[in-house]
Amino acid sequence: MLTIDADPFGPEILEDPLPFQAALRDAGPVVYLEQYGVYGLGRYAEVHAALTDWQHFQSAAGVGLSNFRVEKPWRPPSLLLEADPPHHDAPRHVLEPILTPRALRALRPRWLAAAEQLVEEVVGGRGELDLVSAIAQTFPLRVFPDAVGLPDEGRENLLPYGDHAFNAFGPPNDLVAKGLPRIGALSAWVASVCARDALAPDGFGAQIWAAADRGDITAEQAPLIVRSLLTAGVDTTVHGLAAALYGFATHPGEWDRFRASPGLARIAFDEAVRWESPVQTFFRTATADVRIGDTVVPEGHKILMFLGAANRDPRRWADPDRFDLTRDPSAHVGFGMGIHQCVGQHVARLEAEAVLTALAARVERIELTGPPERHHNNTLRAFRSLPARLTPAR
Amino acid sequence: MLPGMLAAAHTLTSPSTSLTTLRVVAGRTPAAGVRELTLAAPDGGRLPDWTPGSHLDVLLPGDVTRQYSLCGDRWDPLTYTVAVLREPAGRGGSAYVHDSLSVGDLVGVGGPRNNFPLVPAARYVFVAGGIGITPLLPMISHAELLGTPWTLWYGGRTRASMAYLDRLERYGDRVRIRPQDEYGLLDLEAALAGAAAGTKVYCCGPGPLLDAIEEAGAGLPPGSLRTERFVPKEQGPPVRSTAFDVELRRSGLTVTVPPQRSVLEAMAAAGVPVLSSCRQGTCGTCETPVLGGVPDHRDSLLSEAERAASSSMFVCVSRSCTDRLVLDA
């Protein structure tokens, strides 16, 4: 087994993780990451197997670097992401049906209309804009908090809260330090809006509380399940949308293909999630000695799964660095896999479908007008800005 | 690292690519009239995950589908265990499992799905009638893992007919074994007597037991009593005895459903097939969204509140109260 001393959470690799990911995959099915004393998986087959094998790769010891067996979590652990069966079962069983495509059907016309309105606004301007702030952030923040049933006040806290939560899965580096001064206030706001009384009567949040009334979860679990929506449901979608827009801006042929077949919206979004992998990494902890290749990962040790590396593994994907709408991106691990697979993936897909469909109807070309700027996060692959020009369709 | 240590370590297993056909890898008789089957993927891969209360649809010859509760260990991702009671009055499914299915045979499956999930509780009361013990076995092991106090009341015709008594022995007096030939019918009043606030009661077994516990537990707080019926709930006659129309809005078709025909059959005949399994309103596969009209719900799945909301129906058995239904299909 090869030992790697590069820091996967350092600024150089966060800026451009692709060369590191290639080296990681080529080093073998498992490597040892010296700096953090953890094992690393970069190939699709092993990442996929580890994600699905919850029996041997547990989440309750934390899905970040911090080992909850010996360290105190920075906030009460998630009942979904940071839980194992049997504790994981009831929260998952309650949340899943609230977010199925069938359950989201009622939102569809509303979100399509909201997307058309947003596209009208941005195309009606000078046509030059930052795709991140003008579209990728604006759309989810317009529709998702309403769907959850959040009050209007304080919604600006959602992105910084999520950004810190995803930084906190990494090591306690500068990215975590910069979030610390505000995190107390942000957490207090999040906790306040997860309470029953703060939530509108018809949203996802109220439906979670209704499950508590039915006895399917406890009243203590309900606010933490609402919190999961707020932590995991905003930043990820923003960066996924930005990834799709970046893909189209840099692959004009794929934009033409999409405009000719707008039914490809969902394929396009999942291809963008594969290609950019907005969630790059998660940890697991071995519950037994686990053999990977010729290496035994000892019980109790942390394993870092590089979802982004797996999604570009040439052993699994032909021409993996290409953003390609003719590809079948099914079974990418950008939403994870197995019992912890992103419970909100249908929400993200519906948001993306709305935005991309509305853009395709009104915009002939998306061109970058300046260098894209990355936003660094210990877990997320993100953009700070994507300066671009939208050419309206004639 | 010693070779012996390598061999002892767990090795990564890929998910199976065959999820619709499993192989019978073991069979045994845990009680008189009960056959236990162990199923595995033909390629030896991981099977889909499940939670206590889940059932597997098993496809038997003659287009017959049966639901059997998973009663094994979910920490074993490579096999499923089901136990099947021979039902002389049944429709042939159990006889086939008992008399014809052999180790090595392939069998078609669907699922697993869970309409009977274990929810958090301060304590559990489990009530099993005969083969109804099967979904409760994994629930009991989960209650143990969760550290939640529990009691099992387990009735059956005779001790010899009651499966898995050996597995329950170690739990001591938390398990109340009550064969009918020794004790008479299960004393549900006694079983529910300890059901203080926060207690969840899980009951699985024959229809008369479920009817009796619904009556005995009528005073419990809503959501406290949870039952699973694998035999269809007794229904009164349909609300209407005449034909009705069903508009299939997405397909742009309207079909007429005469009294002897199910909505599902009428849809299939019109070229709008809906995936279905049990065709008895118990499995939930054929759920179809309702856009208009008032369904005559005849399934065993929807709660009273869900029936009132009527956002969907199970087209295999449910019909219409109104002249016209509008479905999203």
Image (spheres, coloured by chain):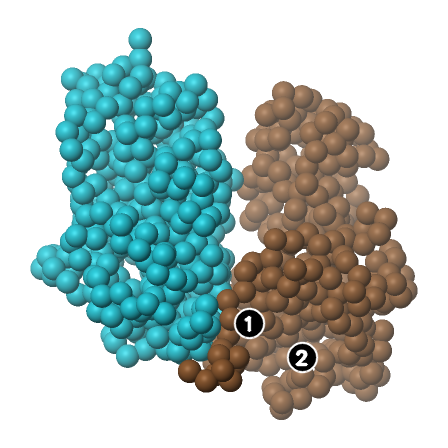
Task: Find the distance from the CA under tag 1 to the CA under tag 2.
Answer: 26 Å
* Residue at point 31%, 55% (across, down): A23
Look at label 2 and name its amino acid.
Trp
Is label 1 on the same chain as label 2? yes
Look at label 1 and name its amino acid.
Trp
Quadrant, the C terminus of chain B:
top right
In the depicted view, which residue is nearer to us: B283 or A210? Answer: B283
- Do the residues under discs 1 and 2 have CB atoms within 8 angstroms? no
For label 2, the SS is strand
Q: Colour of chain B?
A: brown
Residue on which the image places disc 1: B75
For label 1, the SS is loop
On the picture, is B62 further left or further right than B57? right
Subunit ID for the residue under disc 2: B
On the picture, is B2 further left or further right than A358? right
* Residue at point 37%, 35% (across, down): A323
- From the top left corner, tell me how far across and down residue A264 is, in percent: 45, 28
- From the top left corner, tell me how far across and down residue B144 is, in percent: 52, 80
Residue A175 image-quadrant placement: bottom left
In the rendering, which numbered label is found on residue B196? none
Quadrant, the N terminus of chain B:
bottom left
* Residue at point 37%, 36% (across, down): A322
In the depicted view, which residue is nearer to us: A137 or B186? Answer: A137
Residue on which the image places disc 2: B153
- Answer above or below: position of B324 versus B233: above
Subunit ID for the residue under disc 1: B
Residue farthest toward the top in the current orientation of the protein: A394
- From the top left corner, tell me how far across and down residue B248 is, in percent: 64, 26
Chain letter for the cyan colouring in the rendering: A
In the depicted view, which residue is nearer to us: A309 or A172? Answer: A309
On the picture, is A254 further left or further right than B319? left
